Structures are given as C-alpha cells and as structure tokens.
Amino acid sequence: MNPRSRAQLQVIEAEPDRAVTRLHHLIRHREALRGPFQDCWAALSAGAEDAVLERWSEAALELAFVNAGPDCQLAFWRISSELKPALSLNELADCAHAAADICRGAGAQAALASLQALPVAQRTLAASLAGCRAPAAALAG
C-alpha cells in the first residue's frame, strides 16, 4: 500500500466545553434574546473573573433547561445587571438556581415571580440592615 494513499489524521483543538460558550451558542440562535443578552453580558463581564462568569452562565443555562421561558431569562439578566453592585455574580447565580428549582416544582410563572421579587427584597433587606447598623454604631461609639 502506498504511504501517500493512507488517510492522515490531524488533531483539531476544540473549544473547551464551558457554560459560557454553551450559553452564547444558545442565545445566538434566539434573536429576541440576543440584544438584551449582549447588553447584560457587557455589563457583567467587565472585570469579572472567568470562574465567576462560568458559574453565572451555568445558572442561566439551568433556567433555559428547566423551560423557565424567555421572561425568566430576561428577568435574571435584568436583576443581574441591576443588582451587580449589591450582590456578587455567585450570589446572583444562586438566585437563578433557586428560581430553576421553583420552576421545576411550581412552574415558570412562580419562578418569574421569585426573580422579579428579588430587587425589592434586596432593597428592603439593605434598608433594614442600615437601620440596624446605625444604633449599633451609636452604642459602640
């Protein structure tokens, strides 16, 4: 057999299977979500560590895979952008994982309601904590 007629195998490096990559591929095929996602991603990814973005992306994918719907995705992205100064991306990912659990048990509307309530709950909690700190600071001083 002629050595030149043998098939040549070449090693092709593929992108690592990362949640960030899978999320971008998923969104790329959903025109209605593409613009809001790009805006959210630009805000979230600025200065964020790869591991944290990976975890946030895993949470966004989980919402997609439990069929929470585009409204839940949009709500998660909106609160992520809105609450990024107050909560870490890891904490926001925890919220999305909780919403996915709610979706599994009670449906997409309940998951959406939980995500929509998060900014109100965070502001209320922050105000309560600020109220508690003032008297404690006065006592300590």
Image: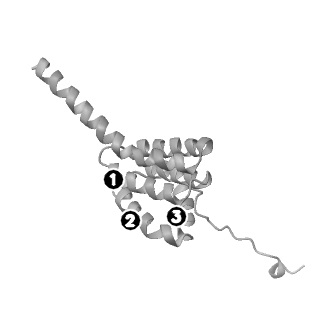
Structural distance between the alpha carbons of marks 2 and 3: 13 Å
Q: Which residue is mark 3?
A: 24
| Residue shown at the point (44%, 55%) measured from the top left | 75
- Kindly state the secondary structure of the residue where label 3 is placed: helix
Rendered image: mark on residue 39: 2
- In the image, residue 131 sits, relative to residue 68, either above or below, namely above
Measured from the top left, where is residue 41 in percent x and y? Answer: 41, 61
| Residue shown at the point (37%, 56%) measured from the top left | 44
Name the amino acid, label 1. Answer: Glu
Where's the C terminus, which quadrant? Answer: top left
Q: Earlier along the polypeptide chain: callout 2 or callout 1?
A: 2
- In the image, residue 20 sits, relative to residue 132, either above or below, namely below
Which of 136/90 is in front?
136
- In the image, residue 130 sits, relative to residue 123, either above or below, namely above
Q: Residue furthest top?
A: 139
Apparent side of residue 67 relative to residue 89 in the rendered image (left or right): right
Q: Earlier along the polypeptide chain: callout 1 or callout 3?
A: 3
Q: Which residue is mark 1?
A: 82
Q: Residue furthest left?
A: 141
Apparent side of residue 21 relative to residue 2 in the rendered image (left or right): left
Measured from the top left, where is residue 96 in percent x and y? Answer: 49, 46
Mark nearest the camera among 2 and 3 is 2
Name the amino acid, label 3. Answer: His
Mark nearest the camera among 1 and 3 is 1
Contact? badges 1 and 3 (CB < 8 Å) = no
